[in-house]
Amino acid sequence: MKLHTLGPEATDSYKATMYLREMYLDLEDAEVVLHSSFDDIYRHLEHEQGDLFLVPVAYRSAQSNGNWADNNLKYSNQLDIINVFKLPIMPLMLVRNPDDNNGKAVLHPSTKQLIKEYSLDKGRKLNLEFVDSKAEALAKFKGNGYEFAIVSKDIYNIDCEHRHDEIISEYSPTMIWCLYRIG
C-alpha cells in the first residue's frame, strides 16, 4: 500500500505521515510517496485506487483555486475519509531580509492570513508569490530577491544560520489532518 502526501521530507505533511506510521501498525510498512504538490495527487487519483492520501485541512493550492474544503466535496466519490487527527506543525516564522526592500514575499497560500495581518498593521502593500510548500518558500527566499517569507522555523534555523534576517513573528499552530482511502 502507498501513502501519498506532499514532499519533500522537510514538510509538515511528511512529518504527519511518519506520525501515522508510528501510531498505526497497519501503516508502518506503507510506502510513502512524496509529491511536489497536492494538486499533483488530486490530478492522478484514478491511478492511485486503494492507496492512502494524507492532506491538512488548511490546504490551499498555489497552482489552482483548489483547497481542502472544496476538494473534499468535489472528490467525495473518489475519496473516503478513514481518519482525522490533530498534530502540531513545525513552528512558523515571518522573516524579513533587510537587504531587499522590494515588498516581495514568498509563501505557501495557507499562510497568507499571517502576512496579510502584518501588511495591514504596517500599512504596506506586499507583492505575494505563492509556492506549493514552506520548504519551497524557504529555498526561494534564500536565493534572494524577496523581502519576506513565511517558513518553518526548524528548517530555517538549520539552513540559514549564516543569514542576518529579521524575525518579525513566530507562530505555533496545530493542524487537523485528513487521511483518505482513494477509491
Image (cartoon, helix red, strand yellow):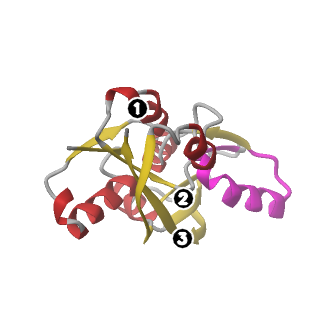
Closer to us: 24 or 99: 24
Marks 3 and 2, the one that precedes in the sequence: 2
Q: Do the residues labelled 3 and 1 touch (CB within 8 Å)?
A: no
| Earlier sequence position, callout 2 versus callout 1 | 1
Which picture quadrant has residue 158?
Answer: bottom left
Q: Position of residue 46 (x, y in %)?
A: 38, 27
In the picture, the quarter occupied by the N terminus is top left
Write the residue at 17% across / 65% down.
Answer: 25
The local crowd at label 1, few if under 14, some if 14 to 19, many if 20 or more residues have their Cα within 10 Å, is some
* Camera-side residue of 55 and 136: 55
Please name the residue that numbered disc 2 is placed on: 165
**Pointer 3 and pointer 2: residues touching (CB < 8 Å)?**
no
Indicate whether 118 appears above or below 33.
Answer: below
Magenta stretch, residue numbers:
104-126
| Circle 3 or circle 2, nearest the eye | 3
Q: State the CA–CA distance, disc 3 to disc 2.
A: 22 Å
**Lateral position of residue 63 relative to residue 83, left or right:** right
**Kind of residue sitting beneath label 2:** Asp
- Number of numbered labels in the structure image: 3
Which dot marks residue 173?
A: 3
Amino acid type, callout 3: Pro
Name the image quarter holding residue 120.
bottom right
Quadrant of res 165: bottom right
Residue drawn at x 57%, y 55% is 58
Instruction: First in sequence, mark 3 or 1: give its number.
Output: 1
Compute the Cα span from label 3 to label 1.
29 Å
Element class at badge 2: loop
Give the image location of residue 154, x and y in percent. 39, 64
Instruction: Tell me, for residue 45, which label it has, or none.
Output: 1
